[in-house]
Amino acid sequence: MAKSNTADASYSAQIRTKKIIRTIICVILCLLSVFPFYIMVINATHSSDTIKIGMQLLPGTKLGSNYTGLMKKAAGLGTNIWVAMLHSAIITVPATILQVYCATMTAYGLTVYQFKLKNVAWSFIMAIMMIPAQVSIIGFINFMMKIGLYNTYWPLIIPAAAAPSTVYFMKQYMASALSLEIIEAARIDGSGEFATFNRIVLPLMKPAMATQAIFAFVASWNNLYTPSMMIVDQSKKTLPMFVQALRSDFAKQDFGYIYLGLTMTVLPLFIIYFALSKYIIAGVALGGVKE
Amino acid sequence: MKKKTVEYGKYGYIFIAPFFLVFLVFQLYPLLYTFFLSFVEYKDKNGKMFGPKFNGLGNYLDIIREKDFTTNSWRYLDTYPLNAIKNTIIMWVCNFIPQILLSLLLAAWFTDTTVKLKGQGAFKVLMYLPNIITASSIAVLFYQLFDINGPITLTLKHMGILDNDYNLMEHAAPTIGLIAFMQFWMWYGNTMITLIAGILGINPSLYEAAMVDGASSKQQFFQITLPLLKPILQFTLVTSAIGGLQMFDIPSLFNVSNGIGGPNRASETIAMQIREYGFVSKNYGKAASASIVLFIITLIISLVFFALTKDREPKQKHAVVK
């Protein structure tokens, strides 16, 4: 009896040590996630000269002068940070709505109706999921030049309507969350197919649509590759293109401005993330297990 | 369900039409057009657009050989686009191996029932955080932190780890290492959450049976978790490899001068090279052929992946998807 007690004690001690070690490692990793952003915010409040001396861990007093300095510099660039943010919003908001709505429509068509090409269409969507946008960019740009959409926001918005991974997610969700009886009942009550979709199905799909909307929003908001090749006007820059400009010569001389500019680009995402992190983490977990 | 909906079949086509219409016009046609452009000479010659003029495999030949102007002879394989592909693969591998190992370790810890970690929710939120932040901003931020006057470089110098006149950005190894680190740092949280979901999807009775048989948690991990996690690990590998091949945002804003990934092209990726050909030097034919090479590599990776997972019976798929 006594023996097993000491065995138990050493076993639970062993577990406790493991727990402490693992917790410490996790805390270190979490600090690593936050640390660069912490330095970024702190340095946004210091002057360039102070930053050049060494690492600052406490906030300074130069936030206001950095802001006016950044705005003055950015004015020469054609697009200031607020306008760049507005441009990104003009692209991202309709693209997100289009992506989620069209994907839900497609998934609905493939779930509820029986038609000849249904399986072909579904296999096709699965097959194109792996094709990245980068491989067709040259043809895409040339095509947009021909039809006069080059250097406009349309090529950054419309393609969102064909997002295979969103269709995949919505179809998986529908398989578990949408009962066909409801649709039958709506038909008997005389509801048209589109009215049923818009008034009955969409509200049922809200949780999945919200998750996908977050990811679509973030992907579009952060996109640099396509806009950097599609948009040539200085005055049409999006937010990641503004960040690109921060990296180039116009701001290079003043570190305080750069850190402040970065902080301003990152802050909205921080707010969205901490407000919605529960849904985002759940969405990652669901979306990843697709095999 | 089947019989009753037959008469509504045409609505099926209507509902999927927008997706396919947009796909055909904005994705498939550009892809075919890129394919066409890869066989023509179509470029900016002294400020005037030349072509498109059929050029056979000329552009592809240009991918594998380059003229050496000092010796006036052809240099094979050691070309900008092929080196860019090599750089891309190196940076991906340096990020993926530590990423998958750490994610697996953390996923095992987070699902370990004998050692229950507290605060898992907060850990997940903070570890996933970098993934949501604009990659361009992260690249510029890290550049600022590690540049010659950056706070981290200065701290390393004060501590005597780096020589006073050492510039990380002038050396290939630290540049590649930092880019790989940023990718790793942005993605391990995502991979970890995916793997946790996969582990939680494994039938718990398997673990119960193993526990009854006296299997340690290490044994359980290697005998149950890892084999059953294989499909998800393969999926992670393939999506990460395909995503990694497109790597652009981070290297294009990290250690660059005149848009080229330095030092000495060591951090130039294939996506950056395509952009340089297409957008800067306006050689659409060459850019298109580089894109098609990238497409073929992507295709091979996907096909190998599908061949690997094909023999899996559909039953297991359902169990995992749930």
Image (cartoon, grey):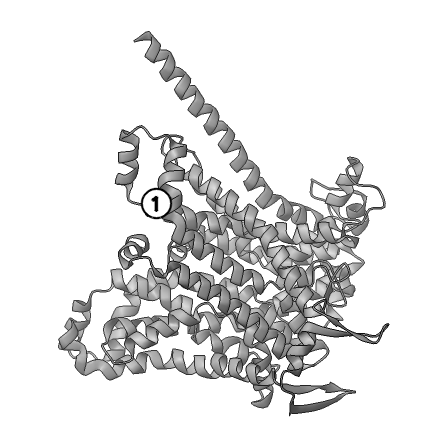
* Quadrant assignment for the C terminus of chain A: bottom left
Which residue is nearer to you in this view: A208 or B206? Answer: B206
Q: Provide the residue designation for mark 1.
A: B200
Residue lying farthest to the top in this orientation: A2
| Residue type, mark 1 in image | Leu
Q: Relative to residue B8, is residue B306 depicted above or below?
A: above
Give percent across and percent down for residue A288: 41, 56
To which quarter of the image does residue B293 belong?
Answer: bottom right
The answer to whether residue B87 of the structure is visible from this angle is yes
Give percent across and percent down for residue B74: 77, 74
Subunit of label 1: B
Give percent across and percent down for residue A242: 66, 66
Number of numbered discs present? 1
Give percent across and percent down for residue B273: 67, 70
Helix, strand or loop under label 1: helix
The answer to whether residue A291 of the structure is visible from this angle is no
Which residue is nearer to you in this view: B202 or A286? Answer: B202
* Quadrant assignment for the N terminus of chain A: top left
A7 on left or right of B100: left
A201 on left or right of B64: left
Q: Relative to residue A253, is residue B44 depicted above or below?
A: below
Which residue is nearer to you in this view: A92 or A231? Answer: A231
Crowding near pointer 1: few (<14 within 10 Å), some, many (20+)? few
To which quarter of the image does residue B276 belong?
Answer: bottom right
Residue name at image x 75 percent, y 60 percent = B262
Residue name at image x 77 percent, y 68 percent = B258
